Structures are given as C-alpha cells and as structure tokens.
Image (spheres, helix red, strand yellow):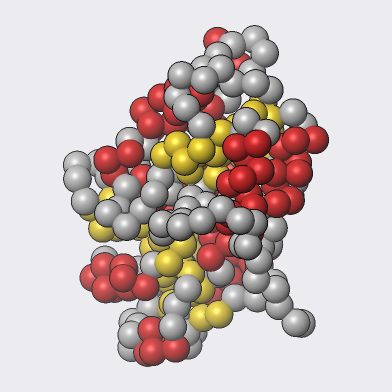
Amino acid sequence: MKIKDITAKIEAFAPLWLQESYDNAGLIVGREDDELKGGVLLAVDVTEAVLDEALEKGCGMVITHHPIIFHGVKRFNSASVVERCIERAIRHNIALYACHTNLDSAPHGMSWKLGTMLGVNNMQVLEPTVEGAGFGTIGTLAAPMATEQFLAQIKSTLGCSAIRHSKIVKESIQSVAICTGSGSSLIGAAAANGCDIYITADLKYNDYYLPDGRFILCDVGHFESEFCAIDLLFDILADLSKIFCNFALHKSANTKNPMNYFM
C-alpha cells in the first residue's frame, strides 16, 4: 500500500483545490510513491506526544486536521516544537498529511459532522463557495429545544469546559447555524439565514454585540469544535481495510486541547 492510496481517498472527499489560499493542506512530509510502513494515526494536530504514539503503535503516517507548517521554516535545529516534530518524522520515516480548510468546505465536511453530532437535520451550506461546497451549515433540530437544555447538550457532546455566548434572547432553539473553527466571518450569513443560534469558535469581544437581539452567538472553543475531524477522517478511510488487508487505522489518544481552563 502506498501513501498515495490514502491521500487519493481523502482528496476524493476533500479535494486540495478547495483549500483556502493561506492554507497548507496535503502531504507535508513524505512521498506519495513511498510504501506505507505500519498503520495510520489520526489526530487534530501534530505534536510530540502524537508522534510518540505513532512510534509506539508502529504508524508510518500521521493525518491531522491542522497542518504543522503554515509559514516557511528557515532552519531545522530543534529550536521549536514544529522543527522537532518535522525532524523526528523525517528521521523515523513518518509521513505527515493535513486535511484542513478543504475538509471544512467539502460537501458533508466538518460542520456537517458537528451538526450531526448535535442532532441538527436538513443541513445546507451556510456560505457557498462552489456548487455543493462552502463553509458552515444551517439546519434544524427535530423539535424546538429549551435554550439552556441545548447549551447543556452542546457542552456535554463536545466536552466543553465552558461555553461563551451572547445574551440569551431565545427561549427555545430550532434553527442552528454551525461553522467549525474560527467562524466570525460567517456571523452575517448566520444572521441572514434567520438562525436561532450560531455555533462556532474564536470569537472576539465585539463579535458578541453583532447578534443585536436576533439570535444567540455561541463560542464552544476551537479544539472542541474540530475534534470531530478525527471521526470524519476515520469514516472517509475506514473502507480501505476492505481493500488492503494489513491496513490499520488508529484514532489518537494523545490529541489534547492546548488551551486550558481554571475552573
């Protein structure tokens, strides 16, 4: 089995041309024609702990949502965690692949996955880019749910230590807009589509004024909104085990939120 057998499967679902111009999705370390040695480990980020796990489990490839390299790296002297991880991956022949904004905007991508987890139905793209693709989703719950009950469900489902939200101006929730990761740019689209609540992450202070009594703005945390990438990637790749008998796919137990809360 070659690396390209895996990348082709991912890119059939989330083509690289869907990624944003600033992004660095795709094969970052390794060669497509190389034989995969060992299994594949799925994680949110490449970290030293994730590479420890890859070595322990004999994985020759780590697939993450976030690219380990966003900007040019001028030297490799172990001075930063990025340099150390890249050096280590090369030394141990571990391929590193990222599926980022292309997975966000692919049809039935990240926001669809999160919406399904939260019980949102009849989802459509919130901000279309090309036919069938775009960022965010909007859909409805099967029945209206009391707002505080729905917030508690979000907190429990996503394992949030806390949820930041604007003023609760709705007694119940039925129309739900979602954008995983940093979604402040879609607040206007969420408002225009008449949602009761917009769930996203990385909101700034002034963003919380923007709902202006029309809907609830909910920040669940960047990691919490994107942890679902592991399950989504697993679903995309799972049937490769039917084609390649020795294919082993692992969900990382060491993917951790770098942000902590003092409760």
Q: Vertically, is 103 above or below 150?
A: above
Q: Which residue corresponds to the image point at 74% horizontal and 28% vertical from the top-left?
A: 58
Q: Vertically, is 45 above or below 80?
A: above
Q: Which residue corresponds to the image point at 55% horizontal and 45% vertical from the top-left?
A: 64
Image quarter hosting the N terminus: top right
Q: Quadrant of residue 25?
A: top left
Q: In which quarter of the image is residue 225?
A: bottom right
**Residue 122 x %, y %:** 37, 47
Q: Which residue corresponds to the image point at 48% horizontal and 69% vertical from the top-left?
A: 201
**Residue 191 x %, y %:** 29, 73
Count of labels in the image: 0
Q: Which residue corresponds to the image point at 43% horizontal and 67% vertical from the top-left?
A: 182
Along the line of sight, the residue nearer the viewer: 3 or 238: 3
**Residue 152 x %, y %:** 64, 69
Q: Is residue 88 visible?
A: yes
**Residue 222 x %, y %:** 53, 65
Q: Vertically, is 222 above or below 135?
A: below
